[in-house]
Each structure stands twice: as structure tokens, then as C-alpha cells.
Image: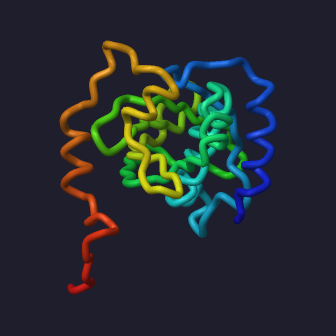
Amino acid sequence: MHLIIRTILLLLRSRRRSALSIWDPSSIGLRVLLTDIDIAMHMNNGMYFSVFDLGRFDLMVRSGVWRQMRRRGWSPVAAGETISFRKSLQLGQRYTVETRIIGLDERAIYFEQRAVVDGEIHARAYIATRLVSKAGPVGNDEIIRAFGPPPADMVLPEWLHAWRLDTSLPSTRRPAPHAW
């Protein structure tokens, strides 16, 4: 809930920014706010994933994909995320969120996202996403028909595909019992 106003503002601003292809990288400028920091006075590790959501929304809106998804009743969901930190973002510091799709496999669309200050990466995340409808997950074949094929040179790194397989939970149609 804490990012709802930022999200709404971003959705409105992104509509007025230059158009992109869904396969292009996007960049948004942000500042570390008081609501983003933790007791150590730097951006909380969980906030990176929240502001990275904003980067993906910007790309979807500017490419026209967001409007098409909403018309079809599709919603984006994160299926898996991993992040590495290099430097902390401090209260009041300006930074950009850089976002791009780096590949697809039979179950997910993969994004690479970075928090960047003065050309230096402070954090990098990889996010495996899905589109879902009331009928269930939307297949990549249907997504590609709707949004166009990825560039021919776009190849998902094998380690990222293996990461998703190695860390995924069972499907919602299968049991996932809790036992330590």
C-alpha cells in the first residue's frame, strides 16, 4: 500500500513519455524517500523489489502492453526474484531504475533490473514473471501473438532458466506441504 500513490503517478507520467517497444530497455528517475529506508538509514532491501515494480510498469505502459493486458484481463505476477547488492542507496539520493526483458522460457518472462547512480550499478535483480487471467496462466505463445516476437538475438541465459527451475515451488494444482 505504501507505493500506491507513487504507482498511480508513475502510470500517469509514463503515458506521456516516449513510446518504447516491450523489448526496449526503460529508465525511470527516482529518489530515496523516508518511506524507503530502514533503521540503518539506507534503502530497505525489500524496497528494491517494490521500486523495481515501478520500472516494469513504466516499460509496460510506454510500450502499450499495459493497455492490451488490461483489455484482455491479464495481470502480471512475479514468479521468482533474486537480487544482489553492491552499494547502499541513501536517504534523499537520486537514482535510476533500469529495466529490460532478457528472455523467455516456456513458463516465464525474465526481467533484469538495476538501481544505478552516476553510471554505477548499486543493485541488480532478476525477476521471473507470468501473466495470468481468470482462466489461469497465459501461455507465452499467446503473449508473443499479442505483443510481437522477441528480437532474434535475445537468448535467455541458461543459468537463469536453471535458477527458476531450482527455486520454484510446486504448481498450485499440486500439494506444497510445510515441513522443516
Q: Residue at x 72, y 49 (%)?
A: 7
Above or below 1: residue 100: above
Residue 29 visible? The answer is yes
Q: Residue at x 68, y 33 (%)?
A: 29
Q: Determine whether, in the image, residue 129 is placed left or right of residue 176.
A: right
- Outermost residue, bottom direction? 179
Q: Residue at x 29, y 64 (%)?
A: 171
Above or below 111: residue 169: below
Q: In the picture, residue 17 is in which quadrant?
A: top right
Rendered-image quadrant of the N terminus: bottom right
In the rendered image, residue 76, in percent from the top left (x then y), is placed at 53, 48
Q: Determine whether, in the image, residue 131 is placed left or right of residue 53.
A: left
Q: Tally the marks.
A: 0
Residue 95 visible? The answer is no
Above or below 114: residue 177: below
- Outermost residue, front direction? 135
Q: In the picture, residue 30 is in which quadrant?
A: top right
In the rendered image, residue 51, in percent from the top left (x then y), is placed at 60, 48
- Outermost residue, top direction? 152
In the rendered image, residue 157, in percent from the top left (x then y), is placed at 24, 31
Question: Which colour style is shown?
Answer: rainbow
Front residue of 84/87: it is 84
Q: Residue at x 43, y 45 (%)?
A: 138
Front residue of 151/36: it is 151
Rendered-image quadrant of the C terminus: bottom left
Q: Determine whether, in the image, residue 173 is placed left or right of residue 78.
A: left
Q: Determine whether, in the image, residue 131 is placed left or right of residue 64.
A: left
Front residue of 176/94: it is 176
In the rendered image, residue 118, in percent from the top left (x then y), is placed at 58, 26
